[in-house]
């Protein structure tokens, strides 16, 4: 069994089908995720040994040792003529398992994603914090890559990305990129952020704001004249603000609320929803900072932020997820069933249109 050939063949099938992911789990046939739904590939079930041999054929010696020590491994890989992938190897009931996510070679533009025109205005900001949030597989990395691409096409900037692993590879156009991978190019997100401020960046992308030290460094960078992008696994603007605040102790929170109120530019909370015909479409709740929301954050009244998002929309580009879902159903892009399934506030959506039977 030529395992390297087989793993390449499996990954080739992912790109051929236009799937987003490949899953290899023992005692199961290979699975691909197509338009958000897992589907089996018409192949025999794999044993743990099959997966281990295929997985190890992609690893360097250092990565093998790392996986054997921690039983977890994140990395990116580029296979000529096939594609680029983000990979995660792990163990389940003692067997090796693997998950691969496709990363397009070509960085998409905001127009190709059908993103709101507001995103281009946000890219013209000189400083502040822009957060793109959502569950795993909601397209956060793709949206951020398109935002950086917009800056790359239109402005002369130094852009530092800190990722684990590096996903999209940007070609320098008007801007220049310094892409840093955690553990390969730097020790941690927080360490990279600390030293990034000495590397004369204009724009900083933080692949994941995982801990207190990273979040604090991101807020400081945004306050001191840098445009900072970050991600969190949260489903709405209010939850994102609370997630950031909850990382800090009670006596630290007033200072963090003050920093957040002055540095936050926008929170984009997106969900990918299956379209009626084929493919998926992003439904994005968008918060754009204004004086009223800044005051609510400072005064520890985050629970009122959503109401302010509903009130302060004129001329700002702000929108709630409920409005977006309603409009997508009205346009015939998504079904009512899926709108309610993915809704953060289904009761609010029900006031705009009847629930499906």
Image (cartoon, helix red, strand yellow):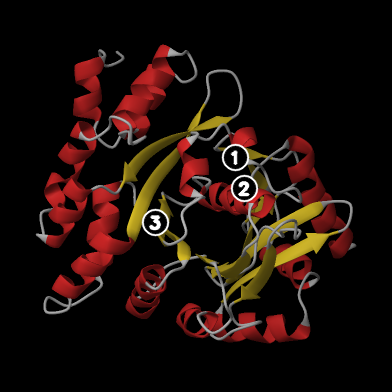
Can you tell which mark lies on residue 233?
3
On the image, the x and y values in percent for residue 11 come to 77, 51
On the image, the x and y values in percent for residue 41 come to 71, 40
At x 79%, y 39%, the residue is: 16
**1 or 2: tag closer to the N-terminus:** 1
Q: Quadrant of the N terminus?
A: bottom right
At x 26%, y 57%, the residue is: 241
Can you say whether 61 is above or below 263 in the image?
A: below
**3 or 1: tag closer to the N-terminus:** 1
Q: Quadrant of the C terminus?
A: top left
Left or right: residue 45 versus residue 141 is right
Q: Nearer the viewer, residue 191 or 64?
A: 191
- C-alpha distance separating marks 2 and 3: 24 Å
Can you tell which mark lies on residue 110?
1
- C-alpha distance separating marks 1 and 2: 7 Å
Q: Are marks 3 and 1 in contact (CB under 8 Å)?
A: no
Q: Which residue is mark 2?
A: 150
């Amino acid at each position: 069994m030529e395992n390297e050939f087989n793993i390449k063949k499996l990954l080739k099938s992912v790109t051929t089908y236009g799937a987003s992911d490949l899953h290899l789990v023992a005692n199961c046939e290979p699975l691909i995720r197509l338009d958000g739904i897992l589907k089996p590939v018409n192949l025999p079930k794999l044993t743990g040994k099959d997966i281990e041999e295929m997985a190890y054929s992609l690893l360097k010696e250092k990565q093998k040792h790392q996986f054997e020590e921690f039983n977890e491994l994140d990395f990116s890989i580029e296979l000529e003529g096939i594609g680029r992938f983000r990979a995660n190897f792990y163990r389940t009931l003692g067997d090796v398992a693997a998950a691969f996510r496709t990363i397009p070679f070509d960085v998409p533009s905001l127009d190709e994603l059908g993103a709101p025109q507001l995103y281009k205005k946000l890219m013209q900001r000189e400083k502040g914090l822009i957060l793109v949030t959502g569950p795993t597989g909601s397209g956060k990395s793709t949206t951020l890559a398109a935002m950086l691409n917009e800056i790359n096409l239109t402005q002369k900037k130094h852009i530092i990305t800190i990722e684990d692993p590096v996903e999209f590879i940007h070609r320098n156009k008007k801007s220049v990129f310094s892409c840093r991978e955690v553990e390969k190019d730097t020790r941690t997100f927080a360490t990279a952020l600390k030293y990034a401020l000495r590397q004369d960046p204009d724009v900083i992308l933080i692949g994941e704001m995982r801990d207190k030290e990273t979040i604090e460094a991101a807020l400081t960078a945004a306050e001191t004249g840098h445009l900072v992008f970050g991600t969190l696994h949260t489903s709405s603007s209010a939850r994102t603000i609370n997630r950031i605040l909850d990382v800090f102790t009670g006596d630290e929170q007033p200072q963090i609320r003050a920093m957040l109120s002055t540095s936050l530019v926008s929170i984009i909370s997106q969900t990918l929803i299956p379209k009626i015909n084929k493919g998926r479409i992003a439904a994005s709740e968008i918060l754009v900072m204004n004086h009223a929301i800044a005051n609510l954050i400072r005064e520890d009244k985050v629970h009122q932020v959503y109401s302010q998002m509903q009130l302060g929309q004129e001329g700002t580009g702000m929108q709630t997820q409920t409005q977006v879902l309603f409009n997508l159903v009205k346009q015939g892009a998504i079904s009512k069933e899926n709108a309610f399934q993915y809704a953060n506030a289904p009761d609010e959506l029900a006031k705009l249109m009847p629930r499906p039977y």
